[in-house]
Image (cartoon, helix red, strand yellow):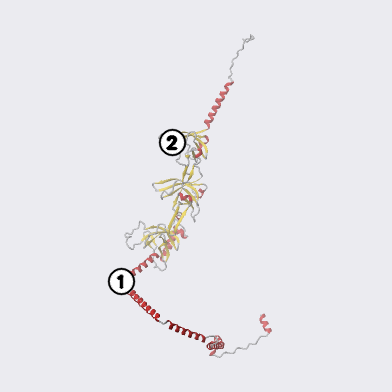
Amino acid sequence: MSNNGEPAEIKNVNSISKIWLVPIIAICMGAWMIYHQWSNQGPLISIVFENASGLEAGKTKIKMHNVDIGEVKTIALTEDLQKVLVTARMSANAEGLLRESTEFWSVNPRISLNGISGLNTLVSGTYINMSTNLEGASIRDFVALSAPPITPSGTPGLHVTLNSNAEFAFKEGDPVIYKGLKVGEFESIYFNFDERVVYYNTFIQAPYHKLITSNTKFWNASGVQMELGTNGVKVKSSSIETLITNGVAFGVPEGLPQGERVSDRSYFNIHDSYESAAEERYKAVAKYVILVDDTVRGLHIGAPVEYRGIQVGKVLEINPPNNNQQKWLDSGVAIPVIIGIQPGRIEQTDDQAGIEHIRQQMRMWVENGFRASLQTGNLLTGALFVNLEQYPNVASTKIEQFQDYEVIPSISNEFSQITEKVSAILDNINDMDLVQFSVAANQMMADISASANSMNSTADDFAGTLRQMDEQQFSVKLAAALSGVAELTQGFASGSRTNNEINDTLNTLQQRLRELQPLLLELNQAPNSLIFDKPPKPYRQPNSVNDNAQQEHK
């Protein structure tokens, strides 16, 4: 009952207290946050590293283009205890980047011949970098690279494969040069044991990849290249970078068209030099053999074949292995040298038609004295080259065959001819009777010595005679002689009788010459006037003044 005596009213409370709204709202918000976090979190991936140097769970970030797209969660050893397994949580927007082409690597400070990288990690710490070209299926397990890739995936450009059967001259990271500018790098190296050829996977950056065409040639541009050849000493260097490391250069040799664009992973050969790369454009070769009687020392494969100073081919082989001469060590046996004449070098078509044209011309030239000889191209190196020349004074001959090749007749070079002449002179000297010559020379020297002694004796006698002369008597005779000379000079002096007579004689002679001058002039004009009478000159009446005026008017 209530205080006023009225009974209390009892009501049932069925509603929930408003105080419960606070924990309910908190639970809902927490659930929403959990759902939001779960729905927006990226996938969990695993990456296998060689070691965990610089990596920390909960701190190390995964970046792409310097943007955080993941974080390392755990670090543990693999089951075989040989490597490190890193578990990382990626952001949701990075899920589409996780493909078979995706690459991961840790970024640390590195110093190499190619430069210094990763210095920013000295402040921010080590991080994991990532790159992809969005190719391949979606995966979650990866194996990290042991070092940063030369060219990250997705970099615009062109991949080409260079091959060389030379030594391992290049390594990963070596530059590709175009006109002194670095435009690409070597990415990886593969050696084919069956072919025994080294393949270099190379990347050319955009937009320079547009320069690679079907006629592009690559050649070695490493360091300083020194060549001692028939043209002297050549020193070349591509760039300062290639002085420290190796590298290749490329371009289209002069005289070739630009060609067509190539596809990815096209194959190219690496040539030893630009000259050898340019040589590749001459495909057709007319092969001949010359039989050399002289020494071939100094002649090398690739030496030029010239005609009057213009290169028309090159040496292909020296004493080929299929040479069937059984007595090639005997005296007088010629050494075969195979040369190739290239039609493209002499303004002919670089095909079979050009070869046939050369063969027809060569048969005619050989009959007219076309000959080959070895000439010294450089006295310093002793390098030889093959010189082709017309010799009209040699005997005519038909072109012959040596095995499968036509033979161009050869003659001795100038040096060999000089050597033969010197040898002949030395032989003549050896044939001389040197004993008899020595006896005669000794007798001559004895006679010369006796004559010299006689001259010395005569000189001594003459000196004694001069000393015996009376100096005073000699002075008197000298004074008398000088007095006679003075009298003779006075007789010819100006105003003397002798001088006047000489002047009169000269004046008379001059007058007679003037009198003879008309006669001489007449004889000069008419030499027969002394024999025949001279015809009288016709009388010519002088013209009047009027006649002269009319003549001038005409």
Q: Is residue 185 visible?
A: yes
Disc 2/disc 1 C-alpha distance (Å) = 98 Å
Residue 547, compared with residue 372, is above or below; it is below
Q: Residues within 10 Å of mark 1 (few under 14, many from 20)?
A: few
Looking at the image, is mark 2 or mark 1 earlier in the sequence? 2
Quadrant holding the N terminus: top right
Q: Is residue 274 visible?
A: no
Residue farthest top in this picture: 5
Residue 457, compared with residue 222, is above or below; it is below
Q: Residue at x 52, y 86 (%)?
A: 490
Q: Residue at x 45, y 53 (%)?
A: 224
Residue farthest front in this picture: 472
Q: Which residue is mark 2?
A: 84
Q: Quadrant of the rendered structure where residue 445 is?
A: bottom left
Which element type, helix, strand or loop, lies under badge 1?
Answer: helix
Q: Which residue is mark 1?
A: 435
Q: Amino acid at mark 2?
A: Val
Q: Judge from the rendering whether residue 330 lies leftward or rightward of residue 382; answer left or right.
A: left
Quadrant holding the C terminus: bottom right
